[in-house]
Structure formats: C-alpha cells, structure tokens
Amino acid sequence: MNIFIFLYAIGIINLAFGFAWKWIIVVPTAIFFAAVKFNHGMKVVKLLGTYLLVSMMALLTLRALGDTPGLGLIFYPLIGGYILFMSFATNRYEAQKQAIATSDWEVIRELENETGFELILMIGAVLLYVASLFIPAVVFNPLTQWLFDAIFRVLNLPVIGWLLGIGGSLFLLGMIFNGLIASAYIVGLVIQKCSNEKSCFKKLTRLIATDCVK
C-alpha cells in the first residue's frame, strides 16, 4: 500500500465513521441523556467512539505495514498517529469556533470545563493507537472488523462510493489544515494556563512572605 492510498483510506474512514457515528449514535444519545439529565453519559459515548475510530485506524495501519518494508514500518505509524491527533484537535477547534460564532456561552463554558477530559482523551487515543500496533488483539474484534469492512464495501458502490472518495480526500486536507491551527490554539491555552498558575503561585508566595515578615 503506497502512501497516497493510505492517506486516501484514512480520509474515508474519518469521514464515513464520523458522519455515521454522529447521526446514528451521538445525536439520539445526547437527546436521551439530556432528557434524563445524565451529564456524564456523553463522555461514555465519546470513549466508545474514540475506541472504534482508533481501532479502524490501527487496522488500516497494520494492513499497510504488512505490504510495506523498510522505512515504511516507521513512516506509516507516524502519519497515522499524527492524523489521529489532528482529528481530535480539529473537532475541538471547530466546536469552539462554532460556539463563539453563535455566542453560545453555555457551550463555551462546557467546552472549557471539559478541556482536561478532551486532552486526556486525545493523548489516550494516540497511546492506544501505538499500543495496538504492537498488540493487535487490543483493537481486533468482530465489531471493529465489521465496521472497517463495511466502510470499504460502501466505497465500491457506484455513486455513493465516488462521492465518499472525493469527500474523504477533501476532508483529510481540511483536517490537516485546521488541525495545525487547532494545535497552535491548544498549545496557546496550555501555555496561558501554565503562566496563570505560575502567576498565582508567585502571588501566593509573596503573600506568605509578607505575613511571615509581619
């Protein structure tokens, strides 16, 4: 499997799974959890969706590694891990941008409160992806295999497959571009948070020193 086919397949997996997962699982469960007022329910959904997406990315990478000798054994996992990280960063950035554009302060506040969870989810997804390349049993099961095969069976359909292929390619390019912007945004938030904590620490130290002098 050459690099262009690998990137093309990654774009298709992200587009097809993201679309189906959102409208078949996320939207109905969000309505249900809102009705029963179970605030942590969507975190469980995010964890499951992350596992399935990482699993299919890992299955694709393992297939590519089976056909690729030499430097490809390092190159393909690096690309897969990078794009996986970019996809999470892009989702976070797009949600933040949309909330700001519509002045939805409740969503903005919720996103800020979930920053820690999202960061752990992002890092955990990359670690799971790397671990699955050494221990394929972590991600290889009937459900992930069926989803993986189903996406590429749809790709063989006359019109839908053609549209999915074009959409997957455009989605991948947009994800990489937006992911770079999102990564810079996330790094900025982390730096700002660290600087605020240092500033608070300095103020606290100064107050303690003043009290001791008194």
Image: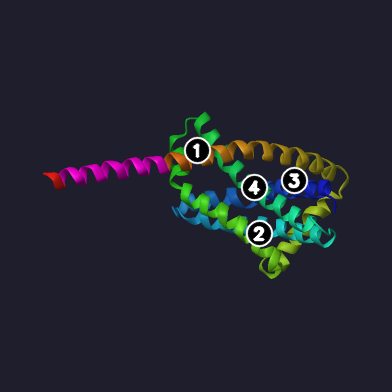
Where is mark 3, residue-wise? 11
Where is mark 4, residue-wise? 23
| Spatial separation of the CA atoms under disc 1 and disc 3 | 27 Å
Magenta-highlighted residues? 194-211
Q: Secondary structure at mark 1?
A: helix
Q: Secondary structure at mark 4?
A: helix
* Residue 95 x %, y %: 55, 39
Where is mark 2, residue-wise? 129
Q: Marks 1 and 2: which is nearer the front? A: 1
Residue 48 in the figure: left or right of residue 16: left
Q: Quadrant of the C terminus?
A: top left
Q: Are marks 4 and 1 in contact (CB under 8 Å)?
A: no
Q: Earlier in the sequence, mark 3 or mark 4?
A: 3
Where is mark 1, residue-wise? 188
| Spatial separation of the CA atoms under disc 3 and disc 4 | 18 Å
* Residue 100 x %, y %: 50, 32
